[in-house]
Amino acid sequence: MTIARVALPVGVDQSFDYWAPSGLTLDRGSVVHVRLGARRMHGVVIGLEAHTDVVPDRMRPIDAVADVAALPADVLELCAFVAAYYQAPLGQVHALVLPPLARATKRRAVATQEPSQHAQTDRNDAQRAAAMAIDEALGGFVPFLLQGVTGSGKTEVYLDAAARAIAAGGQVLMLVPEINLTPHLTARVRAALPDAHAVVLHSGLAAGRRRAGWDAAARGEAQLVLGTRLAVFTPMPRLALIVVDEEHDGSYKQQEGVRYHARDVAVYRAHQRGVPIVLGSATPSLETYANVREGRYRRMDLPERADRRARLPSIVLTPDRDARARDGISPVLADALRRSLGRGEQGLVFVNRRGFAPSLKCSACGWEAGCTRCSARLVLHRHPQSLRCHHCGHEARVPTACPDCGNVDLLPLGFGTQRLERTLRDMFPQARVARIDRDSTRARGSFESVRSRMADRELDILIGTQMLAKGHDFPRLTTVGVLGADNALYSADFRATERLAALLMQVAGRAGRAEHPGEVIVQTDFPDHPVYGALRAHDYERFTRGLLEERLAAELPPHTHVALLVAEAHDRNVVDEFLASAHALAGSAVRALGAQLSVFPPVPALMPRRAGYERAQMLVQAQRRAELQRFLPQWHRGLAGIPGKRVRWAIDVDPAGF
């Protein structure tokens, strides 16, 4: 009898043994349908054995082999690495890899003609040199940082390198941080590589289309896979090149379940497969900068904008609390928008707050509308009018009077995208104004529709959140206004200023990308802060050098390596008791292993209450990554043995913030 060891997508670390009925063909990596208790689920065969310690009458048969390609050895090894590094159940990692298991109803035919030659037209010297360096690295592991100012033509370098890899018979994996970036980039890929078989993979696709793309990649038919972080696990037998666009973007870090970072997994996969990887960004992460400085990554620069007519925009800093401002729009920004509209050009107003106003407050007693389930204020929305929590989704009616003192004078404080949309329509009644945020783009295709209208010059002013900060090129966009940037300077998150600098550079980079000069108006009350100095000088690297020195002095990443234990329960005492036990276990593990680690006491989370759960956390830190990885498995086993099931917890390795 053949015994199959199957990893299942359940919250346990162990695998389960099943017997294989005669006539059932199994391989390591086969996807199978099995039963676990009363549940039917699918799993991945991670081993075939002749014997088992499980009592025969307690062992169940495999029901069937799923109609999907078996996971190849390299993907199984990648999954094992991710499970071990991020302290996640192996079966849950496999679940990230597998496509929808319903049979795809339609599969694209494979092109039989040879890929067309991809001409490098209008490339500058830096672009050609970068593409050539990547081409020369094909066939070996070389990690590149491709750093270029916004509008420098990084995508053209990716496509030139991809064309060469495909012409040599390879496959290319290209990752982007946001689903909304895939339609635009897909169009560029198909225009540049019209005969290449390209597929798109992300969680927003219909199941049949996603399955068909996954199958084509796994069979080696798809020559280019374009996708979000989930695509990093796609089986690709002829993988020759990996590209991670906007590598600094926080969207590459999964914040729940298997808390992996797709950029880092992509680097590991490139090393595993012996292929080059290109990390592209105008504002690279400090982790990537550190790797460049230490000689692990090779840097390539694109110092000029690809359009020879374009120049970097001028930066104007103006007071945020100007008494003459109208609903947050300063006179300086209003005048700049008026001038651009008069020239037949376009403007963009950026504020990283959706809704009408971030808060509703009583002018008499100071009451503020707060979420009953979170440590957060409710955001005032219009159309429909309501108070909403942007953390848990809770909604409440807008009160007609203060619930504490009865005062009817309730004030909306601050400015969100809805309020700015109304204000700009009133200020410029002849202008065509549109808003892009999570609320306005819920319908399928709505984001791309607005983007197309902007590109076709059917809009004059666009208002939006960070969805607009990257990956968009509008030649007639010359004026960009930034509101609320100072909010990040008050954050307790150690990464806040790094994120702010990257965001400002990216937003500013939307202006003046063609022959029309650009102007960026930033409203701030701290014009002397280093982040604004770097923005004015267009010198992100100088700013990051200072940040790296600060991180070194404070012993923070990337100079140290950390894991965060997060715990939550409805009862604060339960959380505190669990973390007290976890802290004691960590100390015992450190002493037993002789590990060089710092174990910090538990503290409340940045948001102590969310969705009705009380939340707290504790941190372990090591100077060397190997020390942390040696410690985590033993600590994890101890945490799993803490009695009680009323607390939810997870270990977050290399957390995005704490």
Image (cartoon, rainbow, N blue to C red):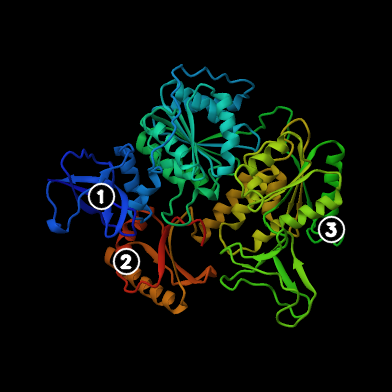
Q: Is residue 157 above or below residue 591?
A: above
Q: Which mark is residue 326?
A: 3
Q: Which residue is mark 1?
A: 6
Q: Which mark is residue 640?
A: 2
Q: Which mark is residue 472?
A: none
Residue 395 placement: quadrant: bottom right
The answer to whether residue 651 is seen in the rendering is yes
Task: Determine crowd level at label 1: few under 14, some 14-19, many 20+ residues with C-alpha closer than 10 A.
Answer: many
Question: For numbered disc 2, what is the local secondary structure?
Answer: helix
Give the image location of residue 593, x and y in percent.
28, 63
Q: Nearest the camera: 251 or 401?
A: 401
Question: For numbered disc 3, what is the local secondary structure?
Answer: loop
Q: CA distance from mark 2 to mark 3?
A: 55 Å
Identified at 29% across, 62% down, the residue is 634
Quadrant of the frame with the N terminus: top left
Residue 10 placement: quadrant: bottom left
User: Between tags 1 and 3, which lies in front?
Assistant: 1
Q: Nearest the camera: 213 or 151?
A: 213
Question: For numbered disc 1, what is the local secondary structure?
Answer: strand
Q: Is residue 145 above or below residue 596?
A: above
Residue type indicated by callout 3: Arg
Task: Determine crowd level at label 3: few under 14, some 14-19, many 20+ residues with C-alpha closer than 10 A.
Answer: some
Q: Is residue 607 left or right of residue 377?
A: left
Q: CA distance from mark 1 to mark 3?
A: 63 Å
Q: Is residue 45 left or right of residue 141?
A: left
Q: CA distance from mark 1 to mark 2?
A: 21 Å
Identified at 46% across, 16% down, the residue is 113
Numbered marks: total: 3
Q: Is residue 477 above or below residue 91?
A: above
Of the two numbered discs 1 and 2 on the same chain, state the one appearing first in sequence.
Answer: 1
Q: Is residue 161 left or right of residue 235?
A: right
